[in-house]
Image (tube, grey):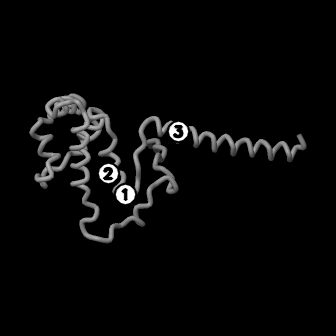
Amino acid sequence: MSKRKKDSTPALSEQLVLIDMVPSEEGSMDISLLLKDSLSRAMRNTDLSRWQIAARISELVGRTLSKEMLDAYVAESKEGHNFPAKYLPGFCIVCDTLEPLAVLAGAVGGSVLGPKDAEFVEIARMEREKAELEDQIRKKKVKLGV
């Protein structure tokens, strides 16, 4: 008999409640133009050429991404060409931006934190836990008369 893997699924309180976010209008979740705009803006804000961006993404992902493919993926006029998710982490690293990820997260009511902001959130969580533990210790001391 095989050992059962521990369930690593987050508790319901930690998951997004997407049922409440069901869009009311057809097509209202189409973020393709927002994503393309975000990708274009990121490329304009870097000192790298599109050839360099495509080459570096290709290196990181291990799959070829040409400058022509990159241009087609971000062109608003190319409706059938959508930026593949497999390239997105590499794109964000190469262009030093989290904005495209924020566009995706924002579509479902989420947000993206950079590494520094995530550290601040972790510190706040730890401070809250510390305060809860201190309160439990205080209550136990009162109970013991110490």
Q: Sequence order check: which comes first, mark 2 or mark 3? A: 2
Q: Name above or below for residue 91 compared with residue 26.
A: above
Q: Quadrant of residue 24?
A: bottom left
Q: CA distance from mark 3 to mark 1?
A: 23 Å
Which residue corresponds to mark 3?
A: 120
- Which numbered disc covers residue 104? 2
Which residue corresponds to mark 1?
A: 108
Front-lying residue, 76 or 135: 76
Disc 1 marks which amino acid? Val
Q: Residue at x 13, y 42 (%)?
A: 71
Front-lying residue, 37 or 130: 37
Horizontal arrangement in the rendering, residue 136 relative to residue 19 (left or right): right
Q: CA distance from mark 2 to mark 1?
A: 7 Å
Q: Residue at x 27, y 35 (%)?
A: 95
The percent coordinates of residue 99 (x first, y second) are 32, 44
Q: Secondary structure at mark 1?
A: loop
Q: Nearer the viewer, mark 2 or mark 3?
A: 3
- Which numbered disc covers residue 52? none
Q: Residue at x 25, y 50 (%)?
A: 35
Q: Residues within 10 Å of mark 2 (few under 14, many from 20)?
A: some
